[in-house]
Image (cartoon, rainbow, N blue to C red):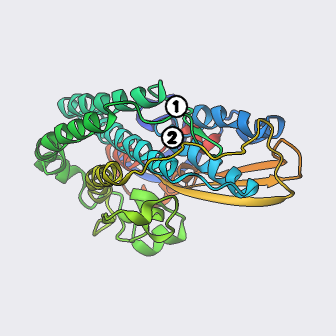
């Protein structure tokens, strides 16, 4: 029995695993979380509704912080009865899907780094850098964007953004096939991932899996399509799924979702209407009537939810976050029975945990 983590590089964050082995075979595993706890939910009780927004992207899923802003603002808008302008909704979708692509690229690239495919890691970082430059041109930041606002977004798209985005997506598509050839369809990766860390459909649903981890187990569930929010019902896209629920399937789903996100962005750029980027009448100190609201979005890791309770004051009475990473960590004892220590590293990477959102 030994400790893996909480500062081991292969745990993808400050995750501690107590692993019991017989030789190289894992016979027991217990995950321990809480090493990155920053009290976001308690902090929110002592900030106004607007002041909570910057905390969401810094204390949760920092690989896709746009989604953290989005889900909180949606919950606050439900409490306040605010209707977001249509142009703002389109901008939210565009930056959200760009951030999804960036998140998937770092997930896929990190897997390459974990398995010795360092060239693949460097290639994915080149394309991720192009995506980050687009997001920086809109938001002014590269990681913690703080771009969403209650009622809309902070600013409109800059001049030339649509053309730059189309060019970047064209470059990404040009690299897509060589990504597949170098990594996903490579013989070595298939031998290491096929049949490893299998999560059946029934177990995926029972244990609360979501996002690519759930869809890799051949469960067609995507909040953008099945619980449509914002303006996702205006776009044509498919929901990729795997066949066997193994490590290869989970990474294949992320590859295919990059293409689907690119399709959504292109449609949004074609359809985006004119109009304001933020709703009228949003005050500096909004005080929603007593009540509660729950909002959820499809983040790169799965269902990200935010539950808000109002007591009528200008500060939330209670905020609760539903993070997909927290539920995925508890999959590990189920996925890692009987695997080797080398397989354990791969399995952790395929559920793509971000410990910031797990611990909050």
Q: Is residue 44 left or right of residue 344?
A: right
| Residue at image point 85% right, 48% down | 317
Q: Report, in whole angstroms, how far the alpha carbon at label 2 lies from the one at label 1.
A: 7 Å
Q: Residue at x 63, y 52 (%)?
A: 74
- Residue closer to the observer: 310 or 301: 310
| Residue positioned 20% across, 31% down in the render | 123
The quarter of the displayed image where residue 44 is located: top right
The answer to whether residue 203 is seen in the rendering is yes
Residue under pointer 2: 66
Question: Few, some or many C-alpha atoms within 10 Å of disc 1 (few <14, some 14-19, many ≥20)?
Answer: many
| Secondary structure beneath label 1 | loop
Q: Cβ–Cβ below 8 Å for labels 2 and 1?
A: yes
182 to 254, vertically: above or below = above
Label of residue 145 in the image: 1
Taking the image as shown, residue 265 lies to the left or right of residue 302, namely left
Q: Is residue 17 above or below residue 28?
A: above
Q: Which residue appears at 81% of the width and 49% of the height? A: 318
Q: Could you tell whether 39 is left or right of 217 in the image?
A: right
How far from the left and from the top, in percent, is residue 84?
59, 52
Q: Nearer the viewer, residue 185 or 27?
A: 185
320 or 186: nearer the viewer: 320
Q: Is residue 174 above or below residue 254?
A: above
The x, y position of residue 235, in whole percent, is 36, 62
Looking at marks 2 and 1 on the same chain, the residue that comes earlier in the sequence is marked by 2
* Vertical arrangement, residue 130 with respect to residue 217, above or below: above
């Amino acid at each position: 029995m030994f400790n893996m983590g909480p500062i081991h590089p292969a745990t993808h964050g400050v995750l501690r695993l107590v692993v019991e082995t017989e030789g190289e075979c894992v016979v027991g595993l217990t995950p321990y979380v809480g090493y990155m706890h920053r009290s976001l939910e308690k902090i929110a009780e002592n900030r106004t509704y607007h002041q909570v927004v910057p905390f969401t992207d810094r204390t949760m899923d920092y690989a896709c912080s746009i989604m953290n802003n989005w889900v909180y603002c949606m919950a606050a808008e439900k409490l306040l009865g605010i209707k977001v302008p249509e142009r703002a909704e389109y901008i939210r979708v565009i930056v959200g899907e760009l951030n999804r692509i960036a998140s998937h690229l770092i997930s896929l690239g990190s897997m390459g780094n974990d398995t010795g495919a360092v060239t693949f890691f460097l290639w994915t970082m080149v394309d991720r850098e192009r995506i980050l430059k687009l997001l920086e041109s809109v938001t002014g930041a590269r990681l913690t964007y703080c771009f969403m606002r209650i009622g809309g977004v902070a600013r409109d798209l800059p001049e030339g953004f649509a053309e730059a985005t189309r060019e970047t997506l064209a470059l990404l598509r040009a690299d897509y096939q060589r990504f597949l050839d170098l990594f996903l369809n490579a013989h070595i990766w298939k031998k290491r991932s096929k049949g490893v860390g299998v999560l059946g459909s029934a177990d995926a649903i029972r244990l609360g899996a979501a996002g690519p981890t759930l869809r890799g187990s051949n469960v067609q569930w995507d909040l953008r399509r099945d619980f449509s929010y914002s303006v996702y019902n205006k776009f044509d896209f498919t929901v990729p799924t795997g066949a066997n629920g193994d490590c290869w399937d989970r990474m294949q789903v992320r590859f295919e979702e990059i293409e689907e996100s690119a399709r959504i962005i292109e449609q949004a750029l074609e359809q985006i209407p004119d109009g304001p980027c933020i709703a009228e009448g949003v005050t500096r100190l909004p005080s929603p009537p007593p009540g509660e609201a729950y909002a959820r979005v499809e983040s790169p890791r799965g269902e990200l939810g935010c539950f808000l309770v109002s007591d009528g004051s200008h500060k939330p009475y209670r905020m609760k976050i539903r993070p997909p990473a927290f539920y995925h960590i508890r999959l590990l004892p189920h996925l890692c029975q009987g695997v080797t220590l080398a397989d354990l590293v791969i399995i952790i990477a395929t559920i793509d945990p971000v410990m910031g959102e797990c611990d909050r």
